[in-house]
């Protein structure tokens, strides 16, 4: 059991395990006949955000996006199951329900990863408004400040 705890405490393994498990269950759940494309749409966005989180190992935004989509997917999964239950076969229903059961665990793992990468959900930190980024104005280039030194090499010191 300690090996599993060590494995899940590694930040890069957590994201990959969550992405792989959900990929397997989402793929099997999509084998059923769905009456709408909503299930496919938000799960596609979730998998893309998980690949982004795997690729950008230092990005807080990538994990935050995956975390928000995964948390909202709990509600969306319940609605999708209720609406499309009559149209789906047993295989798709089983994998959809198992995927729904695993979502709170993956939300917890993604939140842990979010904190490990330096993110916090304190008030105002999710969508900061008082923090303004400065951009270089390329329309009006700034003039270099004059210095006392002569530009270029000092030719007089050669002779």
Image (cartoon, grey):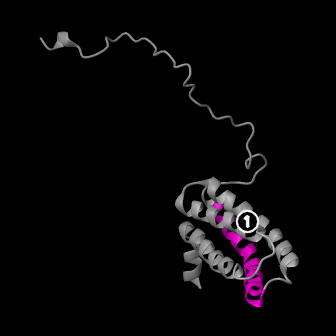
Image quadrant holding the N terminus, namely bottom right
Is 82 above or below relative to 138? below
Q: Quadrant of residue 106?
A: bottom right
Write the start and end of the magenta stretch as one range: 89-114
Q: Is residue 105 magenta?
A: yes
Q: Quadrant of residue 21?
A: bottom right
Element marked by disc 1: helix
Q: Residue at x 86, y 84 (%)?
A: 86
Q: Tell me where residue 59 appears, x and y as whole percent.
A: 58, 54
Is 48 above or below relative to 3? above
151 relative to 16 in the view: left or right = left
Q: Residue at x 86, y 72 (%)?
A: 79
Q: Is residue 52 magenta?
A: no
Counting labels gives 1
Q: Which residue is mark 1?
A: 42
Q: Tell me where residue 55 appears, x and y as whole percent.
A: 53, 60
Q: Tell me where residue 152 appears, x and y as whole percent.
A: 28, 16
Q: Quadrant of residue 159?
A: top left
The residue closer to the viewer here, 15 or 48, is 48
Q: Residue at x 77, y 77 (%)?
A: 100
């Amino acid at each position: 059991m300690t090996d599993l705890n060590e494995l899940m405490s590694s930040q890069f393994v957590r994201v990959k395990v969550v992405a792989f498990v959900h990929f397997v269950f989402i793929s099997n759940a999509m084998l059923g006949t769905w009456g709408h494309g909503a299930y496919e749409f938000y799960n596609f966005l979730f998998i893309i955000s998980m690949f982004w989180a795997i690729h950008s190992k230092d990005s807080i935004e990538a994990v935050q996006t995956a975390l928000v989509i995964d948390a909202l997917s709990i509600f969306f999964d319940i609605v999708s199951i209720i609406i499309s239950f009559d149209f789906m076969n047993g295989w798709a229903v089983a994998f959809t329900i198992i995927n729904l059961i695993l979502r709170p665990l993956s939300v917890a793992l993604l939140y842990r990863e979010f904190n490990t990468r330096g993110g916090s959900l304190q008030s105002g930190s999710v969508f900061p408004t008082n923090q303004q980024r400065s951009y270089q104005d390329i329309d009006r280039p700034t003039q270099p400040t004059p210095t006392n030194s002569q530009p270029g090499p000092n030719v007089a010191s050669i002779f």
